[in-house]
Image (tube, rainbow, N blue to C red):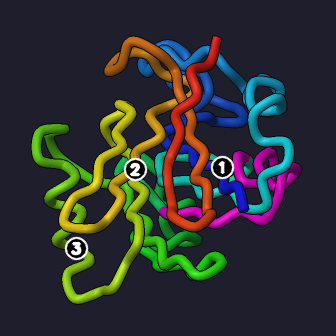
Amino acid sequence: MKVGIISDTHLASGGIRRVATRLIQKVSEDLDGLYRLLLPHFQGVEVILHCGDLVDLLVLDALGKFGKVYAIAGNMDPAAVQAQLPKKRILELDRFRIGMMHGWGSPEGLSIRIRKEFTGEKLDCIVFGHSHQPYDKMEEGILMFNPGSPTDRRFALKRTIGILHLEEKIWGEHIELE
C-alpha cells in the first residue's frame, strides 16, 4: 500500500488570508496549483495523511481526489480548522500503526518532543510536520517521517512531499517538487 504524506500546505482559498499567505508566508500555490503539483506523485495512493497547517479545510477536498484523507490540526491553522481536526491521532493502515502530530517549537529536537507525546503507544511510524524540512529516521524502533512542505521554501531548500510504503516493512520516500 502507498500512502501520500503532506504537511504545511499553508493554503487559503480566498480573502485577506489568501493575500497574507502569498505575501507573508511566500506560498506560491493555490488549491488548483497544489492538485496539479501532486497529480503525478499521488496517483495510485490509497490514503493521504496531512500533518497540519492546512490553513483552509478546502485543502482536504483537493487531496480527497486522490484517496481517503486523514488530517490533524497544526499551530498555524485558524480556529475553524482546529475545531474540525484533532491535534493528534493514531491510525491502523494494513498491519501498521501510524501516529500523526504536527509539532511545535524549534526544529531542533522536534522528533523527540513528538515521540514523547506518543509514550506508551505501540507504533510503527509517526508522521509530523511543522519544520518544513524533510525527515526520515528510525528512532527507538519507530520510523519518524516529516514530508517537508510542498508550497513553502522559507525553511528548506526544496519543496517536498512524501510517500510511505507499507510492505513487509514500512519505509518512507521524499519527493522533491519542481
Q: Residue at x 54, y 19 (%)?
A: 27
Residue in the picture at 66% in, 56% down: 3
Q: Residues within 10 Å of mark 2 (few under 14, many from 20)?
A: many
Q: Is residue 177 visible?
A: yes
Disc with the residue nearer the chain's start (1 vs 3): 1
- Work out whether residue 75 or residue 161 is closer to the camera in this orientation and state it: 161
Q: Amino acid at mark 3?
A: Glu
Residue at the spot of label 2 = 145
Instruction: Give the mark, 1 or 2, whose residue is nearer the N terminus.
Output: 1
Magenta stretch containing residue 159, yes or no?
no
Residue under pointer 3: 117
Identify the secondary structure beneath mark 3.
loop
Identify which residue, 46 or 101, lies in the foreground.
Answer: 46
In the rendered structure, the answer to whether residue 92 lies left or right of residue 140 reads: right
Q: Residue at image x 80%, y 45%?
A: 62
What residue does disc 1 label?
A: 4
- 154 vs 40: above or below: above
Which is more foreground, mark 2 or mark 3?
2
Distance (Cα) linking label 1 and label 3: 23 Å
Q: Is residue 156 left or right of residue 151?
A: left
Q: Nearer the viewer, mark 1 or mark 3?
A: 1
